[in-house]
Image: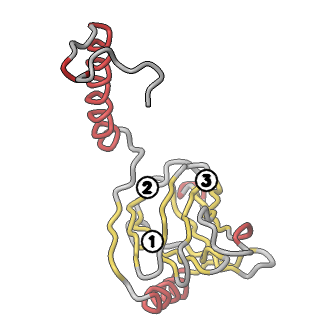
Amino acid sequence: MAIHPPASRIWWNEPVAKAELVWIGVAFVWGLIMFAMMIYWHIYGQQNLSTTVGRIDPAVFEERTNDFVAKYQVREEGDTGVPVVKPEPGGDAYMLARTFEWWPILELEKGKPYRLHISSLDLQHGFSLLPVNMNIQVHPGLEHIVTITPLEVGSYGVVCNEFCGLGHHVMTGRIYVVDPGQGG
């Protein structure tokens, strides 16, 4: 029950005030502008990932990642023993998620494209590349393939941003971007 019921019980037949029509028009035009901007930013804004997603058995993805590490490993990271892998520019790079680890560490060359394959072996995880603001939900049985071209030299953190258990807070990884002219 309304506090003040309308004077006429058939309120939808009443004329709409000009101020309301103006605001309805403004909201409609703004909605069209925002819709157009979504398309524009996807194409020209370079903010949305264009990924290919396909089904893959987690055991097959793990085998491919292990083969990739065996072929391109250049060193191990500090006391952790996590392999640092430097794939060929223009080639494939693999990174897998498993409780509570992103594996392996990648070393990529600035300005060179790579096809980054990402999947999970066990649970849903989140691939968040910082500070780039790249964010992908990673599920077991699905493989994301993202074409990336690193533009700035540096060390980039990979964190899981989907709660995956008690060790979620330590699930981090790393991607290094090196300048090929500086000798890596």
Q: Answer with left or right where residue 69 lies relative to residue 58.
A: right
Tag 2–tag 3 contact (CB < 8 Å) = no
Q: Is residue 151 above or below residue 101?
A: above
Q: In the image, residue 162 lies at what x, y percent?
A: 59, 65
In the depicted view, which residue is nearer to us: 81 or 23?
A: 23
Q: In the image, residue 23 lies at what x, y percent?
A: 32, 16
Viewport quadrant of the C terminus: bottom right
Q: In the image, residue 11 lies at what x, y percent?
A: 26, 21
Q: Is residue 47 above or below residue 157?
A: above
How far is mark 3 from mark 1, CA to CA? 23 Å
In the depicted view, which residue is nearer to us: 144 or 103?
A: 144
Residue at 45% across / 85% down in the picture?
61
Residue at 26% across / 14% down in the picture?
21
**Residue under numbered circle 2:** 149
Q: Secondary structure at mark 1?
A: loop
Question: Which disc, if any, is residue 88?
Answer: 1
* Amino acid type at image mark 2: Thr
Question: Which disc, if any, is residue 130?
Answer: 3
Residue at 60% across / 77% down in the picture?
103
* Amino acid type at image mark 1: Glu
Residue at the limit of the structure toward the right, as seen here: 79
* Amino acid type at image mark 3: Leu
Q: Residues within 10 Å of mark 2 (few under 14, many from 20)?
A: some
